[in-house]
Image (cartoon, rainbow, N blue to C red):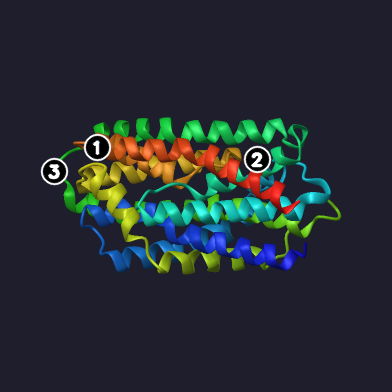
Amino acid sequence: MPILPVLLLLAAVILVNGWTDAPNAIAAPVASGVLSFPSAVLLAAVCNLLGVVCTTRISDAVARTLFSIADFGPYAVTALTAALAATVLWAVIAWRFGIPTSESHALMAGLIGSALALGLDRVRLEPLLRVALGLVLSLLLGAFLGRAILELLPTGKDPLYQKGQMLGAALTAFLHGAQDGQKFLGVLALLLTLQTGTFSLPPQAPWVCAALMALGTLLGGRRIIDTVGRKLVTLTPRSGFAAELGCAAVLTLCTLWGLPVSTTHAKSAAIFGAGAHPDSRVAGSLGAAWLFTFPACGALAFLLVRLLN
């Protein structure tokens, strides 16, 4: 199977990620009325671009984790095709119903499912454990920090928190680019180094990835924002600011540790921790979707590998 169609499929996944995943970074300021939807989307697009480009110059630890998650051997192109196709299908379904699932975790599930279709020995344990640790931390630490920071913030300073939310949204979008951009670059490195097996990327790769992600964000993600920022909890400028800080802290720590985590999970957890009057039905549907992402995408990729082979 030629590599070009797989590269085009990867480009589609990056675009869809910017469309459906990046809006989580701006959910809180839009829901609390600090930013209009068009302004917030433009802010997220610019900061996503900067996050991908700047972070890869400092550390590529997250990209290397994805690069080493499995040994696909001579079936790498087939396995990556199946993983990317499963990710796109899941993302479109989730967007249609306004469910903020994570394309990055769907991608990781697809990679693992593809590897399992080739044999259990293809999956590498250490990167897999890093993925699992990132999943747990993004949820538990996000909710804890969102609530803890809220309790530390004084009341009655809404104008200050409104300005802080804008800065927090910019930082979260930047870190989203840093996290998810690196995941996609790790997959790109797998494709471009099939012969050598040594991690390397062309210098223009982060820019292309960043541009595609920013374009996807500009296409909008209002349904996701409505679910996370308006239906899940009630947000004020103060609680929205606490959620921004909590999410940013989680993403920063995990990026420095090289743990692939989901902006969607970290932000939703931080909003849930900081917000008031949580809707148990919305929270339950989000939790079910998150739990279903790994087995669903993994199984879909598994079946696609078997069919393609």
The part of the image, by quadrant, that contains residue 154 is top left
What residue is pinned by disc 2? 112
Q: Residue at x 40, y 36 (%)?
A: 288
| Of marks 2 and 1, the one in the foreground | 2
Mark 2 or 3, nearer chain start: 2
How far, Cα to Cα, is label 2 from label 3?
48 Å
Q: Within 10 angstroms of label 3, few (less than 14), some, or many (20 or more) residues? A: few
Residue 15 horizontal side relative to residue 78, left or right: left
- Specify which label sits upstream in the sequence, 2 or 1: 2
Where residue 123 appears, as percent x and y from the top left, is: 72, 36
**Residue 48 vertical placement versus 232 (above, below):** below
Secondary-structure class at tag 1? loop
Left or right: residue 167 versus residue 119 is left
Q: Helix, strand or loop at disc 3?
A: loop
List x then y, in percent, for residue 216: 47, 66
- The amino acid beneath tag 3 is Gly
Which of the two residues, 304 or 13, is positioned nearer the viewer here?
304
Kindly indicate whether the residue at mark 3 contacts the one at mark 2 (C-beta within 8 angstroms).
no
Q: Position of residue 42 (x, y in %)?
A: 38, 68
Frontmost residue, 79 versus 168: 79
- List the single residue furthest toward the front: 307
Disc 2 packing (10 Å; few <14; some 14–19; many ≥20): many
The residue under label 1 is 153
Q: Label 1 amino acid?
A: Leu
Q: Residue at x 74, y 32 (%)?
A: 120
Label 3, on which residue?
156
Query: Which kind of residue does numbered mark 2 sit on?
Result: Ile
